Amino acid sequence: MYIDYDVADKIATISLNRPEAANAQNTELLDELDAAWTRAAEDPEVAVIVLRANGKHFSAGHDIKGGGPVPDKITLEFIYQHESRRYLDYTLRWRNVPKPSIAAVQGRCISGGLLLCWPCDLILAADDALFSDPVALMGIGGVEYHGHTWELGARKAKEVLFTGRALTAEEAERTGMVNRVVPRDELDSQTRALAEHIAKMPSFALRQAKRAVNQTLDVQGFYAAIQSVFDIHQTGHGNAMSVSGWPVLVNMDEMKANIK
Ligand code: ZN
């Protein structure tokens, strides 16, 4: 079990529970996480959903070695199928759950980690949180779900993607990606207090407020952009495979040196 699930006081708390691997996302973790979101969405006793992570880091991203059964010959069709389900459809589904959700992020939130916190309606960041998407170092233009431009604005999005560097919690708050930065040891208590406040609000009003904001973004092109940039992402895998026979161009030493 890579996910802890708990309901109390109308708040469902979903906890990533693979701290020994910095909550890197293997297939099982993502499938369990999707099941937890569905459970919270369908439970009439749940008014607000909190997504948090056990351990020092929120999530180190996709576990490249944890993709489940891999065919003898990896094709772009296989990658596309795997990623469209877990890195696109899951994230969009969580975004559109008709209940408010809050992500509590501490430590590293790298690439695929963004695909877990971005779909939440609100994000609280601990003062030690660092957000990054250094996949250019693997020959890819950005992680599968292109929240970057929407969350950071065009210039910061390009800076983060071009350099691979991490945004601090304060920087993320300035771009509007994060609602509030809180001391690390108050992350859970402040998240809880916010969730309790929202849980007391009328549920249909919350549902419609969320729909109003998400629908506005969709009318502005959010949904269409997310779909088309997913396909741009796949050209990165296609190029890496044509160059090296593997879906990413991995130079782990360079990667580690650049994401310090
Ligand atoms: Zn990918």
Image (cartoon, rainbow, N blue to C red):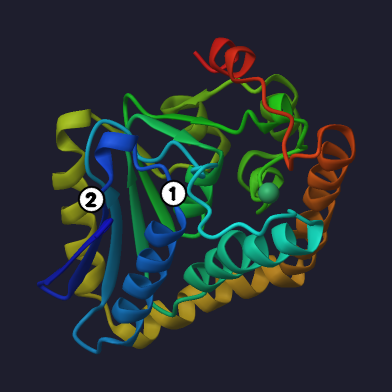
Secondary structure under the numbered disc 1 in the rendered image: loop
- Quadrant containing the N terminus in the rendered view: bottom left
Label 1 CB sits under 8 Å from any ligand 1 atom = no
The foreground one among 196 and 223 is 223
- 16 sits to left or right of 75: left
| Residue 117 image offset from top left, x and y in percent | 45, 51
Camera-near label (2 vs 1) is 1
- 103 sits to left or right of 188: right
Q: Residue at x 56, y 63 (%)?
A: 86
Residue corresponding to mark 1: 25
Q: Residue at x 45, y 76 (%)?
A: 97
Q: Amino acid at mark 2?
A: Thr
Secondary structure under the numbered disc 2 in the rendered image: helix
Residue corresponding to mark 2: 191
Residue placed furthest toward the left = 8
Residue placed furthest toward the top = 257
Find the distance from the CA under tag 2 to the CA under tag 1. 23 Å
| Residue 218 image offset from top left, x and y in percent | 70, 70
| Residue 130 image offset from top left, x and y in percent | 44, 27
Q: Residue at x 49, y 41 (%)?
A: 61
Establish if 36 lies above or below 155: below
- 241 sits to left or right of 257: right
